Amino acid sequence: MVHVYQDGTNQLNKQDNLYCGRTKMNEDLLETGDLSLTLKYPTERDSGSYICTVYRGQDILRQKVVLHHLKAPPPVWPKVLVVLLFLLVVVLGVVGGLLFHFRHYFMSEYQVVVDPGEESVQLPCKTITRLPKDTRVEWTDRKNTKVHVYENGSDRPEEQNQFYRNRTKMKRNLKTGDLSLTLKYPTDVDTNTYICRVYDKEGEILREKQVILNVKVLQVEVDPGAESVQLSFRTTELPGDTIVVWWDRNFRKVHVYKNGSDRPEEQNQIYRNRTKMNEDLLETGDLSLTLKYPRDGDSGWFICLVFDKEGKRLREKRVELTVKDRVQVQDVTSPLMAEESV
């Protein structure tokens, strides 16, 4: 045991007698990340392998360095150079490992890709500094729309945009610096750049991080002649005066739900008696559409728009439907068979 640092102090009683009074580490090593070790008066018997081990919870990082001592009396500078190289390798190895393991803390931009239909997705935002209780945290998108707001120990749903209402949750752990945001029921419309900004009580930005979210478009394929196909869309519970409209690629109304009931008189004629939605769709948040007797002309994108009674957009989802082509069966009847048939 060459040197031990634990609980903010050097544990000199734990080191071997061979190194007593000969080792030193920086006082601000946790703040600077400089874990270099100075070994005084190195001799030939100090030659060999040295291992620096960093413990953080269940994570263990190690860096091995071999120190060679010159037998012939050398000038002082080569000895210093060997020690400096040793310390440099240790620092680079440890810091590199920490940066990779805790990359969410240090990366200013991060990309998240999620498949359609996932119940939620997490947008990471972490900092290694302990934040004060009066910290304000704002999650916004690239248009500066407020996605989630946290201030003075509580969320501020009244400040967030209606499109994200009841769909976000933040970890709010100021002690560990974990401000990651969970976004429920992501759709391709949520594909965006999200920015997490941390402010102090004076309004100065303490931390900023960008997360690029890419939600894949839901692809649905159906064989020709199928009885029906479902275009899935699941979200959170919605108020009773919500309006739900499904459109096709030609901007024709496929299905309309308003004031608690379907409105078949508002849908396009080609979809009359071919669509169905769940009766308890607002309570369950299941806005999926069943399209009966799909045909070739139905291929293309369908979009579901959800509005409140004032006409503000609350939700949106796009689905790509492909109705496979019918297999063309060739006539393999031979002329002889045709003659026999006649």
Image (tube, grey):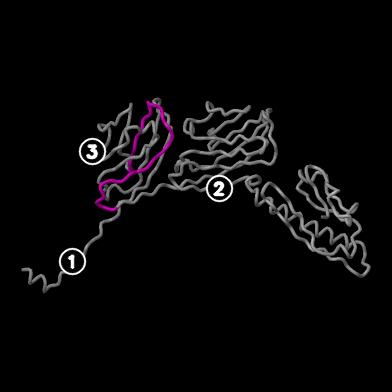
Q: Are marks 1 and 3 in contact (CB under 8 Å)?
A: no
Question: Which callout, 1 or 3, points at the residue further toward the start of the chain?
Answer: 3
Question: Horizontally, is 201 left or right of 161 in the view?
Answer: right
Looking at the rendered structure, which numbered label has been put on residue 331? 1
- Three-letter residue code for mark 3: Asn
x 68%, y 28%: residue: 201
Q: CA distance from mark 3 to mark 2?
A: 43 Å
SS under mark 2? strand
User: Residue 102 placed where, x, y %?
Assistant: 65, 48
Q: Which residues are magenta?
A: 223-249
User: Residue 275 placed where, x, y %?
Assistant: 28, 39
Q: Are marks 3 and 2 in contact (CB under 8 Å)?
A: no
Q: CA distance from mark 2 to mark 1?
A: 53 Å
Question: Which callout, 2 or 1, points at the residue further toward the start of the chain?
Answer: 2
User: Residue 52 placed where, x, y %?
Assistant: 76, 55
Question: Is the C terminus in the top left, top right, bottom left or bottom right quadrant?
Answer: bottom left
x 63%, y 30%: residue: 136
Q: Are marks 2 and 1 in contact (CB under 8 Å)?
A: no
Q: Is residue 114 above or below residue 198?
A: below
Looking at the rendered structure, which numbered label has been put on residue 111? 2
